[in-house]
Image: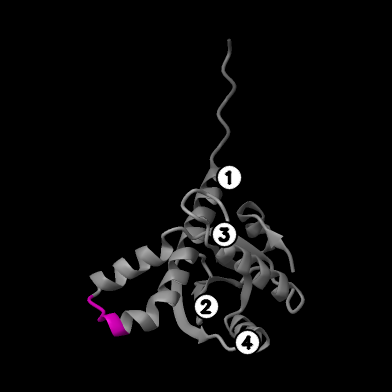
Amino acid sequence: MAVITIEQLPARLAHGKTLAGLDLGDKTIGVAVSDRGFSFAHPRPVILRKKFSLDAAVLLALLEKENVGAVAIGLPINMDGSEGPRAQKSRAFVRNMAQLSDLPFVFWDERLSTVAAERTLIEMDFSRAKRAGKIDSAAAAFILQGVLDRLQSLDAADRREPEPPTSA
């Protein structure tokens, strides 16, 4: 398994695979999975965290079932651009997963993803109790949708024809 950049991601995704998005919390792991066309992020039920080995086994089983070819993981960067303890926990999680899986991971700046996910759930009129059970998967979907949108913009840029040289 390797940590790759968003630009390297298309070459690493085999035909027919999906892309997963993760939002790591202290108590849960929010999960979302793309469609095979890499257009839409679909939330999945959260994984309740117990200990790493159990969490990893549940996560790997889900990723296999969903035919995932790569994983985008939210990197909780501080508003000033620095990385704090939560970002370090995310990096450690990926390092530990590297020993268990060959799937490539992409880190994605998740600043304000939980805030955006919560606003969306409020707009959908979810009660506070229902939001608590869905927020991490909604945040994972928000993270994954950002990655999918970026992949589409990279693809569009690659398809643009180069501009003809201008004469001086």
Q: Is residue 55 magenta?
A: no
The quarter of the rendered structure image containing the C terminus is top right
Give the mark, 2 or 3, whose residue is nearer the N terminus.
Answer: 2
Question: Pointer 2: what residue?
Answer: 26
Please report contact status of discs 1 and 3: CB closer than 8 Å, yes or no. no
Residue 20: image location, x then y, percent? 56, 72
Q: Amino acid at mark 1?
A: Asp
Q: Is residue 163 above or below residue 36?
A: above
**Within 10 Å of the Cα at label 3, are there few (<14), some (14-19), or many (20+) other Cα atoms?**
few
Q: What is the secondary structure assignment of the residue under circle 2? A: loop
Q: Earlier in the sequence, mark 2 or mark 4?
A: 2
Marks 2 and 4 sit apart, C-alpha to C-alpha, by 11 Å
Q: Which label belongs to residue 158?
A: 1
Residue drawn at 67 percent across, 69 percent down: 92
Whether residue 40 sits left or right of residue 125 in the image: it is right
Name which quarter of the figure residue 84 lies in. Answer: bottom right
Pointer 3: what residue? 84
The span from disc 2 to disc 1 (Cα, nearest Å) is: 39 Å
Q: Residues within 10 Å of mark 2 (few under 14, many from 20)?
A: few
The residue segment tinted magenta is: 125-129
User: CA–CA distance between discs 1 and 3?
Assistant: 35 Å
Q: Nearer the viewer, mark 3 or mark 4?
A: 3
Cα separation, mark 3 vs mark 4, equals 22 Å
